[in-house]
Image: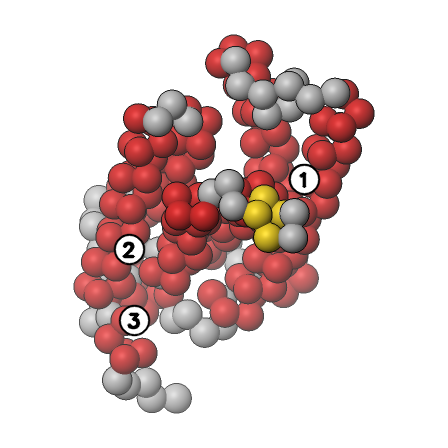
C-alpha cells in the first residue's frame, strides 16, 4: 500500500531520527532534574532509558540509526507523568506509584524488544514476541525491586524497608502483578504495531537497514 502525507513525513529517516533525539534530550533533562532534586534511583532509571535509546546510534556510529519515534514517545510519557502529575491521586490511586512505574518498565522492555527486532537478526513468532516483552517487563520489575531495596539500605530511602514486612511484601507482589499486566499489553503493542505497521526498517540509513533509505 502506498503511503503519503503526514505518515510518509514522520516515517522519513531524517525526521524519525530528529524526533528520536529530541526524546533522548527529554530523558537526559528529566534525569538531570531528578539528580538535582536528590531522586537518585529515579534519575538512574531515566538516564538508563536514555542510554538504551542511543545504543543503535552508538553501535552503528550513525545518528540516524534510531528507534521508531513512537516507542520513545511511549517511554517518555511516564517521565513526563512523574514530572507533572507525580503525587496526585485519583480514587486513591497514586499516579506516581504503580500506574506510572510499570508503564515505564513496560516501555523499557518495549525498547529492548524493538531494538532486537530491528537492529539484530533476531526474529520472533507472534506468541514468543508477546511472551518475550511480558517476561522482560517482569524481569525489569525484579531488577527495579532490587534497586529499591539497595537504595533503602545504602541511601536511606524508604521504598520497601520503611514499611511493615507484611505490607511491603504485599505491595511487592502487587507490583509484579502490575508489571505482568503492563508487559502483556506492551507485548501486544509490539506485535501488532511495531512489528507489523511501524515500518521501522524503512526509517534507517541504507548502511544499517541493508536497503534504500529515504
Instruction: Determine crowd level at label 2: few under 14, some 14-19, many 20+ residues with C-alpha closer than 10 A.
Output: many
Q: In the shown orientation, is residue 82 left or right of residue 138?
A: left
Q: Quadrant of residue 44?
A: top left
Name the residue located 27 percent from the left edge and 63 percent from the top edge: 16
Name above or below for residue 185 compared with residue 198: above
Looking at the image, is 178 positioned above or below residue 210? above
Q: Nearer the viewer, residue 94 or 64?
A: 94
Quadrant in which the N terminus appears: bottom left
The furthest residue to the top: 154
> Which residue, given by chain and number where applicable, does mark 3 sit on?
11
Q: Nearer the viewer, residue 157 or 58?
A: 157
Q: In the structure shown, which secondary structural element does the residue marked by tag 2 occupy?
A: helix
Q: Nearer the viewer, mark 3 or mark 2?
A: 2
Q: CA distance from mark 3 to mark 2?
A: 11 Å
Of marks 3 and 1, the one in the foreground: 1
| Residue 27 left/right relative to 61 | right
Near mark 1 (Cα within 10 A), the count class, few <14, some 14-19 or many ≥20, is many
Residue named by callout 2: 20
Q: Which residue is mark 1?
A: 175
Q: Which mark is residue 101?
A: none
Q: Verify CB contact (< 8 Å) between mark 2 and mark 1.
A: no
Which circle's residue, 3 or 1, is located before the other in the chain? 3
Badge 1 marks a residue whose secondary structure is helix
Amino acid at each position: 500500500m502506498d503511503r503519503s502525507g503526514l505518515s510518509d513525513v514522520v516515517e522519513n529517516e531524517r525526521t524519525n531520527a530528529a524526533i528520536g533525539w529530541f526524546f533522548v534530550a527529554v530523558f537526559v533533562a528529566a534525569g538531570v532534574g531528578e539528580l538535582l532534586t536528590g531522586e537518585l534511583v529515579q534519575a538512574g532509571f531515566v538516564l538508563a532509558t536514555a542510554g538504551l535509546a542511543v545504543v543503535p546510534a552508538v553501535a552503528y556510529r550513525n545518528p540516524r540509526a534510531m528507534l521508531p519515534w513512537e516507542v520513545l514517545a511511549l517511554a517518555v510519557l511516564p517521565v513526563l507523568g512523574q514530572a507533572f502529575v507525580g503525587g496526585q491521586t485519583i480514587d486513591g490511586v497514586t499516579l506516581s506509584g504503580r500506574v506510572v512505574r510499570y508503564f515505564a518498565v513496560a516501555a523499557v522492555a518495549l525498547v529492548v524488544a524493538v531494538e532486537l527486532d530491528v537492529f539484530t537478526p533476531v526474529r520472533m513468532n507472534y506468541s514468543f514476541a508477546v511472551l518475550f516483552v511480558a517476561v522482560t517487563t517482569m524481569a525489569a520489575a525484579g531488577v527495579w525491586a532490587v534497586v529499591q531495596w539497595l537504595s533503602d539500605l545504602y541511601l536511606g530511602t524508604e521504598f520497601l524497608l520503611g514499611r511493615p514486612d507484611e505490607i511491603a511484601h504485599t505491595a511487592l507482589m502487587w507490583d509484579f502483578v502490575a508489571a505482568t499486566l503492563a508487559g502483556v499489553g506492551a507485548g501486544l503493542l509490539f506485535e501488532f504495531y511495531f512489528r507489523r505497521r511501524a515500518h521501522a526498517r524503512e526509517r534507517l540509513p541504507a548502511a544499517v537497514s541493508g536497503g534504500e533509505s529515504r
